[in-house]
Image (tube, coloured by chain):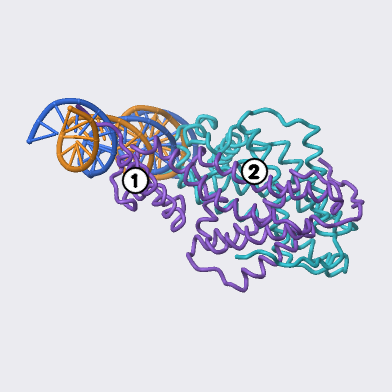
Chain colours: A cyan, B purple, C orange, D blue
Amino acid sequence: MAYRSTPRTEARRVAAREQIVLAALGQVAEDGYGSASIGAVAARAGVATGTVYRHFSSKAALFAEVFRRASQRELDVVTELADRRGLSTAERIAGGAEVFARRALANPVLAYALLAEPVDPAVEAERLVFRRGYRDVFAAVLEDGIRAGEIEPVDCPTVAAALVGALAEVLVGPLSEGAASHRAADPHRSEALITSLVQFAVKAIKHEEEPDVRRTAHA
Amino acid sequence: MAYRSTPRTEARRVAAREQIVLAALGQVAEDGYGSASIGAVAARAGVATGTVYRHFSSKAALFAEVFRRASQRELDVVTELADRRGLSTAERIAGGAEVFARRALANPVLAYALLAEPVDPAVEAERLVFRRGYRDVFAAVLEDGIRAGEIEPVDCPTVAAALVGALAEVLVGPLSEGAASHRAADPHRSEALITSLVQFAVKAIKHEEEPDVRRTAHA
DNA sequence: TAAAGACCTGAATCATGATTCACTTCTTGC
DNA sequence: GCAAGAAGTGAATCATGATTCAGGTCTTTA
């Protein structure tokens, strides 16, 4: 005498949920997190605002998933490039850094949102996971390199984090300007940036001689 | 027949304004920007909320000044260290990086707020100025080094930005955890971090041989 | 087809915290 | 001491945008 969930309704539910996630992602990629109110997302998904809450317990929960998904996509690409067999440590780092930068510059608004735009604390947590993911990928490459004797021993997690930070910072400059002005980046400038970044990353990794820097700060 | 501003009242006005700025700075340094509502700042300064608006046109204006001031203080110290005469390029970079890190670790909540905590867009703009300041200091050192033939030519602004990003990222990990748990950082860990960071920065700068990395990413 | 239950709708409600403003209190110049 | 005007007060107001919910719609099973 009643209603019960069937494959059909279940599929519909999943599709509706997906629709909402994609709408939210689209909104963020197009105009940034700042523009992604529940109202805007609902309108874009073609549902009422209340419907969003049938699928997600809160705005934070929705955008945590959005960030997780977008970030994972990026991280997968970088991981794939950095994990290819038969490459030197430097080549692996260079490959990872290059796709990271290339993809960020190709999708500046999304990249800015994922990397640096002010967001809800709950979403910020997701962002930290994502950054840690990159760090771990680079750290693993460094560890391989050290084990293979290709590079000298270093504090892998720290150096890996430094690389991630370097990439993010260099890209966020252009990105935040780009986000403000909505202008496409100059392709020459982009290529120059990518080249500089890759060289920086490789240089930071490869150096062989012992640095003899005297520690100089007062306090 | 009237009132006119005198040195005495002017001084009082300036003092009141200063009181508010210091209260706001104290609040940020103690519990982060997230805790710094106008009400909290006013209470800390010992004035009514309305008084804050007699001295600042908006919350954003107040905190823009707070950030400007705190940032400038940090930047001055780094600049001083990085600009000392008679040091090699590597020593200057190392000195700047070391104070940056040391001061951030000594005041983690403030550092997190200045570097990475989500803030008002108007305040975010101030933050970008600040980061650009660091970048420019490092870039100037690099240019000196190149001119003197101490290091090979590089894209100075980009490499300098990468250094700033590396420092910030490595520090924000510990800082955001520290901000969450309010625990003081382990001093051993802090020293290790500083050492790793300084070595990273120097290595990224000093390397002499031409890197021969093949560019490998697909897209 | 009808009852039962899940889903959808979107206007109304809430929460938060910045901002205002009518009123009080202080300073000044005469 | 007093009128004029500046500064301070803090409760009330506003703005924004997330969240709720009473009522309508769609599906399913009998």
The type of residue carrying mark 2 is Arg
Q: Residues within 10 Å of mark 1 (few under 14, many from 20)?
A: some
Q: Is residue B168 left or right of residue A97?
A: left
Element type at marker 2?
helix
Which residue was labeled with disc 1? B16
Task: Give a yes or no on whether discs 1 and 2 share a subunit.
Answer: yes
Q: Is residue A174 above or below residue B96?
A: above
Label at residue A139? none
Residue C8 lies left or right of residue B161; in this view the side is left
Q: Which residue does the image show at 62% across and 58% down from the upper left?
A: B100
Where residue A198 appears, as percent x and y from the top left, is 81, 48
Q: Quadrant of residue B112?
A: bottom right
- From the top left corner, tell me how far across and down residue A85 is, in percent: 87, 57
* Outermost residue toward the bottom in this view: B188
Q: Nearer the viewer, mark 1 or mark 2?
A: 1
**Foreground residue among A57 and B54:** B54
Which residue occupies the foreground of this view, A172 or A78?
Answer: A172
Chain name for mark 2 = B
Q: Residue at x 69, y 65 (%)?
A: A216
What residue would you read off at disc 2? B132
Quadrant in which the C terminus of chain A appears: bottom right
Local SS, label 1: helix
